[in-house]
């Protein structure tokens, strides 16, 4: 029973991603060990899958924010800013070429 609860908890935390086959195996185990109906088991699996997806999204967002903070601390620029500056430099060089020599 402990391993079944551990599996369910891990899935709920997003640490265990279940394929359809694994979900069916867990459902059968729930029915056998807990005596719950298939409908109750499926409802629990769906709830756990939703929680896992939510946790995954939260983790992804947190990781992106931390990467952004690290880039800012290191003084790195975003790709969009670099591309904007490169386009500005190209425009300035073309304008300079079209005006001819400065002397």
Image: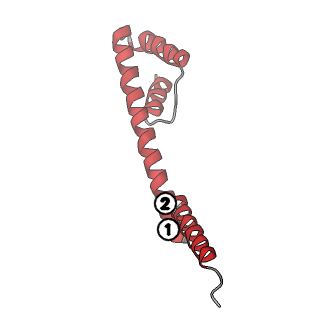
In this rendering, the count of numbered labels is 2
**Residue drawn at the location 34% of the way across and 17% of the way down:** 43
Name the foreground residue: 92 vs 2: 92
Q: Helix, strand or loop at disc 1?
A: helix
Q: Quadrant of the C terminus?
A: bottom right
Label drawn at residue 72: 1
Quarter of the image where one finds residue 40: top left
- Residue 67 lies, in percent from the top left, at 51, 58
Q: Name the residue that disc number 2 marks.
A: 68
Residue 54 position (above or below residue 64)? above
- Residue 26 lies, in percent from the top left, at 49, 17
Label drawn at residue 88: none
User: Would you say the residues marked 1 and 2 are in contact, meaning their CB atoms lie under 8 Å apart?
Assistant: yes
Residue 96 position (above or below residue 45)? below
**Residue drawn at the location 41% of the way across and 44% of the way down:** 58
Residue 22 position (above or below residue 92)? above
**Residue drawn at the location 50% of the way across and 26% of the way down:** 3
Q: Helix, strand or loop at disc 2?
A: helix
Give the CA separation, mark 1 to mark 2.
Answer: 6 Å
Mark 1 surroundings within 10 Å by alpha-carbon count, few (fewer than 14), some (14 through 19), many (20 or more): few
- Residue 83 lies, in percent from the top left, at 55, 61
Name the foreground residue: 17 vs 25: 17
């Amino acid at each position: 029973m402990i391993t079944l609860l551990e599996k369910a908890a891990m899935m709920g935390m997003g640490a265990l991603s279940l394929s359809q086959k694994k979900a069916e195996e867990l459902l059968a185990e729930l029915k056998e060990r807990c005596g719950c109906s298939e409908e109750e088991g499926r409802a629990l699996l769906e709830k756990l899958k939703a929680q896992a997806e939510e946790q995954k999204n939260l983790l992804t967002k947190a990781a992106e924010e931390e990467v952004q903070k690290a880039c800012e601390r290191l003084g790195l620029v975003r790709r969009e800013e670099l591309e904007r500056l490169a386009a500005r430099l190209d425009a300035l060089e073309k304008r300079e070429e079209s005006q001819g020599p400065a002397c």
